[in-house]
Image (cartoon, rainbow, N blue to C red):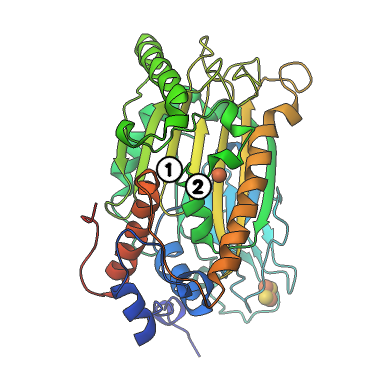
Amino acid sequence: MTTTPAQIHRLPASAAPSGMLAELIERRIPGMSLEAPFYTSEEVFDLDVAEIFAKHWIFVATEAEIPEPGDYLTINIGPHSVILLRDDDEQVSALHNVCRHRGARILNEPAGSVGNLVCGYHHWTYSSDGSLLHADSQPADFDRSAFSLRTLAVRTVAGLVFVCLSNSPPQDFDAYAKRIEPYIAPHALARTKIAAQEDIIEDGNWKLVMENNRECYHCEGHPELSCSLFPTYGYEEGGLPPRLRPAYNRYLGADADLKLTSEANALPYARIEELRQGATGFRIQREPLDGAGESFSPDGKLVCTKLLGEFDEPRLGRLSMHLQPNAWFHFLSDHAVTFSVLPLAAGKTALRTTWLVHEDAVEGRDYDVQALKRVWHRTNAQDGTFVARAQLGISSPAYLPGPYAPNEYQVEDFVCWYINRLRAGTGAAGESGEEQ
Ligand code: FES
Ligand SMILES: [Fe+2]
């Protein structure tokens, strides 16, 4: 019997929300944290995977992680396993890690290097573009061309790698890429290498990990980060508590200096903040750092003496980007650090942190890897504790949604974006977003 490609490629229907979920989405109160099931229910988790992670562009890696043809990563996005592969043409391709014979997972390591892709079960063999090259013991009329590995959309922008599991990825990604590229390109990620990478599993829903990232209300819990990141992040001048006034005054001076330095080095610095809009919500801005203003360190001085790209000015602050739904980034003069959040279960989330330095930087001479990692290694651990506490409290029947403060406006932006995307994806009533 012949199987048609139409039958083979039929996709599972997206997860339509049950009545209970549709009502939860509908009655979300602007300015307040979400109701508990958004963080604790496996049904919401499945909806999040189907509507958010399978329909949007997801930041998963940097090109520097797969520098040579044959280098690959396997990335798990909920139940999906994706192979990211540098192919023979040196392009990054993305394939579903599911054998077209009887479905076995083909690559089982998180990273490595391959020639052809060989399934370990019955040894079907695929080329790096997913074509089926060899399948033993099939009848003479077996049509190999009907059983290539399934591909998915992949984009690279200034050395960052994004995938989209949908057959019709969001169209606004081109405009996003065009706008961020001039900001990031001078940091020359194509000429970096991975100095360190850490994966941690957080005991909390993926949205709590993201919400926690989007405010600095809790930054007193980050003594290492607060040496270089101004604790005034997210505040309007009128809403500053008196204790932050000295830091805010330092921030104003450092920001004025950074604008001059950016202009002198032809670096874009202006804030673009479109966190609620469209499918690919984002924010990007070059912002000053405290102390010496150079890097994330106890005194704000460099943690790698070999600067990125063609930079000869160390005091470039942090070019920071927030991207919905799952990532944030800091690009500095001496290194870059990227963060990718991937959902594991309603109460479990993977956070991958990657530190990149110039490809010619030498460990022990130009940088000490422990010093390079220190601020975000410690900050991630502290944030993990906050996220776990939030998950525990929200899991109590006593939990009620609470109000966001003005300096948590980006948490509200994230939640509005999330609710809007659920409504857009599931056909629920109108978008929210004008509440502020
Ligand atoms: S499942 Fe892969 S070769 Fe059989
Ligand atoms: Fe934090």
Is residue 179 visible to the viewer in this orientation of the structure? yes
Residue at x 34% of width, y 46% of height: 406
Q: In the image, what residue type sits under mark 1?
A: His
| Crowding at mark 2 (Cα within 10 Å: few <14, some 14-19, many 20+) | some
Q: Relative to residue 195, is residue 234 drawn left or right?
A: left
Residue at x 52% of width, y 21% of height: 290
Q: Single out the residue that lies furthest toward the bottom.
A: 1
Instruction: Give the answer, above or below, for where 288 lies relative to 271.
Output: above
Q: Relative to residue 280, is residue 1 drawn left or right?
A: right
Residue at x 65% of width, y 46% of height: 382
Instruction: Give the answer, above or below, for where 385 lies relative to 287.
Output: below
Residue 7, image x and y in percent?
42, 82
Q: Which mark is residue 121?
A: none
Q: In which quarter of the image is ligand 1?
A: bottom right
Asked which quadrant contains residue 184, the reply is: top left
Circle 1 — which element? Answer: strand
| Crowding at mark 1 (Cα within 10 Å: few <14, some 14-19, many 20+) | many
Asked which quadrant contains residue 237, the reply is: top left
Residue 371, image x and y in percent?
72, 27
Residue at x 47% of width, y 53% of height: 211
Cβ(mark 1) to ligand 2 < 8 Å? no
- Disc 1 from disc 2: Cα separation: 9 Å
Is residue 71 visible to the viewer in this orientation of the structure? no
Q: In the image, what residue type sits under mark 2?
A: Asn
Find out whether the residues at labels 1 and 2 contact each other: C-beta distance under 8 Å.
Answer: yes
Judging by the rendered image, the residue that carries numbered circle 2 is 213
Q: Which of marks 1 and 2 is nearer the N terminus?
A: 2
Q: Single out the residue that lies furthest toward the right.
A: 364
Q: Which of 398 and 228 is in front in this view?
A: 398
Judging by the rendered image, the residue that carries numbered circle 1 is 322
